[in-house]
Image (cartoon, rainbow, N blue to C red):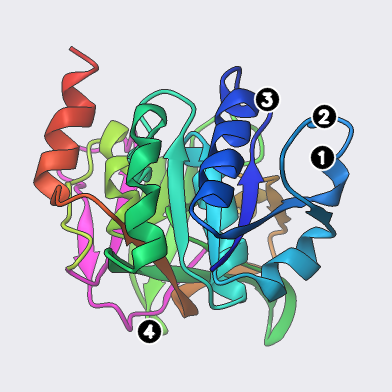
């Protein structure tokens, strides 16, 4: 087996955890590659370094080391290369992690093929002016649409499959996958959705209304959003750098052509993981 390791070295524990993963995989007879741009940061790592794109093409699995943000970023890259990803927690809660840093002995199950794949729906976000595509991205958790002036509310008009269905006076609108239902959507009051239930969630953020609630749509729905006031909006996929949405543009969000395939080594189900992770907040 060939594994490409994508560690987030801004996490305090990540360098030590990465070195232990490399050593464990080598002991199990696996080949482990690290991104070439981390050579100076990990001079003693017991693994060869390759350009990241080359490592992603050559590997059988991607192993992400860090918190949820690191795992999601790695999973997006793995999805484009049609590779499964295993998240190893070197952060805090890490809902997406398949293993904790004290469970590296379970990597033997990865080498033996003794694991399951959780296939997660992803979203495609497109910024359009008319029918011209200006920008595009994919996301695993959510797309956030807000006013460019973050301190002010705005009115966002939403369409479903080309038909206008509502306008929200709010701080923003969050369009999420079931995977993202335990992230920002949960904090915004959205429902928790089992990731095996393929769907698209829409949650208004701080709506100025007594009745606006989250909506759950079928997985092939196409949701469009634009400013109803002629304001400049911003859209961000999985919390990355926001893209400006000018008044003559709209953002269209639909099911992506990729899926994120997460490796699950332990027998914990979704509710087990949810309870354990949220219990840490008490």
- Vertical arrangement, residue 159 with respect to residue 183, above or below: below
Q: Nearer the viewer, mark 1 or mark 3?
A: 1
In percent of width and height, residue 211 lies at: 15, 44
Element carrying mark 3:
loop
Residue wearing tag 3: 10
In percent of width and height, residue 1 lies at: 53, 68
In percent of width and height, residue 2 lies at: 60, 66
Spatial CA span between label 2 and label 4: 48 Å
Disc assigned to residue 41: 2
In percent of width and height, residue 105 lies at: 36, 40
Q: Residue at x 38, y 43 (%)?
A: 97
Magenta region: 197-226
Tell me which numbered mark, 4 or 1, is placed earlier along the sequence. 1
Spatial CA span between label 1 and label 3: 12 Å
Element carrying mark 4:
loop
Residue wearing tag 4: 161
Residue wearing tag 1: 38
Q: Nearer the viewer, mark 3 or mark 4?
A: 3
């Amino acid at each position: 087996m060939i594994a490409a390791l994508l560690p987030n070295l801004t996490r305090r524990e990540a360098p030590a955890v990465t070195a232990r993963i490399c050593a464990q995989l080598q002991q199990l007879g696996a080949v482990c590659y690290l991104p070439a741009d981390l050579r100076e940061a990990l001079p003693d790592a017991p693994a060869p370094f390759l350009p990241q794109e080359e490592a992603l093409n050559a590997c059988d699995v991607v192993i992400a080391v860090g918190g949820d943000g690191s795992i999601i970023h790695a999973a997006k890259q793995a999805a484009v290369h049609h590779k499964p990803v295993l998240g190893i927690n070197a952060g805090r809660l890490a809902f997406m992690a398949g293993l904790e840093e004290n469970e590296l002995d379970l990597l033997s199950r990865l080498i033996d093929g003794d694991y399951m794949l959780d296939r997660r729906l992803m979203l495609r976000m497109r910024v359009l002016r008319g029918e011209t595509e200006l920008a595009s991205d994919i996301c695993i958790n959510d797309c956030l649409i807000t006013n460019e002036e973050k301190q002010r509310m705005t009115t966002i008009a939403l369409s479903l499959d080309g038909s206008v269905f509502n306008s929200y006076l709010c701080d923003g609108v969050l369009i999420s996958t079931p995977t993202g239902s335990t992230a920002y959507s949960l904090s915004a009051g959205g429902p928790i959705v089992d990731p095996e239930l393929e769907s698209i969630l829409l949650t208004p953020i701080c709506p100025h209304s007594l009745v606006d609630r989250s909506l759950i749509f079928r997985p092939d729905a196409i949701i469009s959003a634009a400013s109803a006031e002629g304001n400049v909006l911003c859209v961000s996929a999985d919390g990355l750098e926001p893209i400006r949405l000018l008044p003559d543009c709209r953002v269209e969000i639909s099911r992506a052509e990729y899926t994120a395939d997460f490796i699950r080594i332990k027998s914990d189900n979704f509710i087990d993981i949810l309870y354990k992770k949220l219990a840490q907040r008490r």
